[in-house]
Amino acid sequence: MKVGIVSLGCCKNLVDTQKAMSFLKASGHSFVNDPKKAEVILINTCGFINDAKQESIDTILQMADYKTDRLKYLIVMGCLVQRYKKQLEKELPEVDLFITIDEYSDLAKILNDFLNSKTIKENKVVLATSDYSAYLKIADGCSNKCAYCAIPLIRKEYRSIKFEEIIRQAKELEEIGVKELNLIAQDTTRYGIDLYGKYRLADLLYELNKMNFTWIRILYMYPDEINDDLLEAMGNCDRVVPYFDIPVQHASDRMLKLMNRRGSKKHIIERVKKIREKFENPILRTTIIVGFPTETDEEFQELLEFIQEIKWNKLGAFTYSLEEDTASYNMEPKVDEKVANKRLEKLMLLQEKIAQENNEKYIGKTLDVLVEGRDSLDKRLYQGRSYGNAPDGIDGHVRFTSSRDIEIGEFAAVKIENVNVHDLFGKEVI
Ligand code: SF4
C-alpha cells in the first residue's frame, strides 16, 4: 500500500516514526509525499503542550479530508494518543486505528495485522529525515518529573536502550551513508544509569567515534549530569561536535526548586564556564519557561541577568503551559497570561541582541556546511547547516553562494560574510 507519513513534535517522535516506517517498508509498503496519493496515512502526534495538541488534532482532521475513495485508512499514534486515547476514539471516528506508546513494543505486529500483511522480512532503518542526517534514540521515557511536564506521564520511566543495540543501529546508519548523527532521548546525559548502574554516554561516544560519521551531536543534556567524564570524552572524540543543548528552564533557585529541577544557577554557570574553557567556539543552546506559577518580577529580572551573563548562542523560550496531572497544575498563584507574554517578549528581545552579537563573531570565519537545499530559481544559492545548527529547525541556517554544482548532503567550506539574528550568509571557498 502507498503510505503517507506525518510526524509532528520533537525528534524523539521522529525516531518512532522512522521505526514505524521501517516496519511498513519491510512489509512491502511504499511511501508517498502527497497525501492525495496515499492509501494509508500515519500521523505521529505530539501532546506536549496545548499548542502541540491543537496542531495534532488539526492535522488529523486535515488528513481525514483526504479520505475519499483512494485513502482507506487513517492511523494515529504518539503522545496525544497515549494521553487521550479514549476521548479521541469517541471524538474522531475518522481515525481507523489508534496506537498508544505503551503498544510500541508490538508496533510491527499491530501495523501489519491492521494492514493485513503476514510477514516481516527485514527491519532496515528507514530515514524520515534524509539519507545524510539521522536521529538515533538512546533512551525512552523520563524519570526527572519536572513539575510542568507531562512527558513522564506519557512516556513513562527512563529506559536506556542497550549499548549493543545502539551500536548496531548506528552501524546501519553508517552503512547507509549518514554523515550527521544526532543522539536523542528525553535526557541523553542520564544514559546507562537504569541499565548499567552508571552514566555511559561517554562510553557510547568513544564507540561511535570509531565509525565514519562526520558529526556526532548530542541533544537534550540535563545540566547537573554534564560531568567531567562526559566533557573529557567530548573533547577526545574528534567527530563529536562542541554543541551543548542544555535546557535549563530558569535561573532563580526558588523557581528551579519549584519546577523540580536538580541543580542551581551557580552550578549551571560553573558548567558553562568549564565548557567555554575546554572547547573552542562551543555552541550553547537552552530552553526557558517564563510565567511559571508564582514567578515574581524579581525572579524574572534574575532570569534576564542570567541570560545576559551566559549569552546563549541559541535560546528558545515559552510561556508556561498548564498541563493536567502535572505537579504544577494546582500551584498558585498563576502568572497572568498577559504578564507572561510580556515577559516572553522582553526576554526574546534581549536574546535577539545576544544572538546577533554571537553570530557576528563568525564573520570572516570559514565553516564546514552540510548542504541541504538549493534555490530553484537562482541556482547559485544554497542552504545548509554548520555544526552549530541542529537539524530540528530551531537553530537557523547557513545560506551561501557557489559557482559549482553541489549535491545535497555534501559538505562545503563557506566563508561567512554577513549575519542576522538567525542565519549566517557567505560564499563557498573553493
Ligand atoms: S527532563 Fe523534565 S522537561 Fe524534560 S522530558 Fe523529563 S520531565 Fe519533561
Image (spheres, helix red, strand yellow):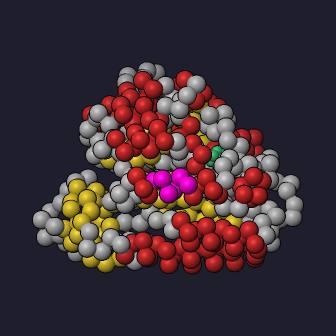
Give percent across and percent down for residue 381.
24, 71
Q: Can you tell which quarter of the image residue 283 is in? A: bottom left
Q: Quadrant for residue 208, please give it.
A: top left
- The residue sitting at 78% across, 53% down in the picture is 258
Query: Taking 174 as reference, is 54 above or below it?
Result: below
Of the 4 image quadrants, the one containing the C terminus is bottom left
**Does 382 sit left or right of 298 as displayed?**
left
Number of numbered labels in the structure image: 0
Q: Is residue 3 above or below residue 123?
A: below
Residue 376, position in %: x, y?
A: 26, 70
**Residue 92 lies in magenta, yes or no?**
no
Left or right for 11, reference 338: left
Does residue 178 show up?
A: no
What residue sits 82% from the left and 54% below the top? 329
Q: What span is colored magenta in the figure?
A: 270-275
Q: Residue at x 48, y 48 (%)?
A: 219
Give residue 103's position: percent from left, percent from top.
Answer: 62, 30
Magenta span: chief secondary structure: helix
